[in-house]
Amino acid sequence: MKRIGGLIHLFVAVCSAMIGYTIHHSLCWAIVDFVFYPIAWVKWLICHEVSLSIIKSTFSFLTR
């Protein structure tokens, strides 16, 4: 059970880093967003930096 929780956290952190790269276009910020993904999500939601269009453009390779 603990292993599944760790995999979920890893998946969410990787997705957050990908979205962070789309927002900032910087590998450094993507790494920071990977490590501190809960804080990044709180900041993005408060500052209205993340939207459905950003999420769609980040994961557009899934819809091709």
Image (cartoon, helix red, strand yellow):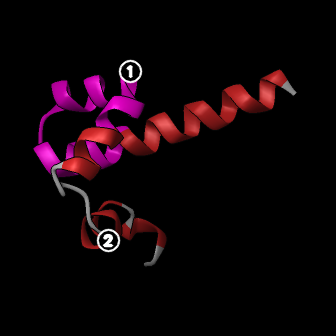
Q: Nearer the viewer, residue 4 or 61?
A: 4
Answer with left or right where residue 41 lies relative to residue 24: right
Q: Is residue 53 magenta?
A: no
Amino acid at circle 2: Leu
Q: Element at badge 2?
A: helix
Q: Is residue 59 left or right of residue 44?
A: right
Image quarter in which the N terminus is found: top right
How far is the residue under mark 1 from the one under mark 2?
A: 23 Å
Quick one: label 2, few (<14), some, or many (20+) residues within 10 Å? Answer: few
Residue 38 versus residue 18 in the image, above or below: above
- The residue at which mark 1 appears reads as 35
Task: Tell me the chief SS of the magenta region.
Answer: helix
Measured as percent of width and height from the top left, residue 48 is found at 18, 57
Q: Quadrant of residue 10?
A: top right
Q: For the point 32% across and 71% down, which residue is it? A: 52
Residue at x-position 79% and y-position 24%: 3
Circle on res. 52: 2
Q: At 46% across and 34% down in the image, what residue appears?
A: 13
Quarter of the C terminus within the rendering: bottom left
Q: Outermost residue, bottom direction?
A: 64
Q: Magenta residues, as a range?
A: 17-40
Q: Secondary structure at mark 1?
A: helix
Dot 1, crowdedness within 10 Å: few (<14), some or many (≥20)? some
Query: Percent position (x, y) of residue 62?
Result: 48, 69
Judge whether residue 38 is colored magenta.
yes
Tell which residue pokes out farthest to the left in this image.
Answer: 25
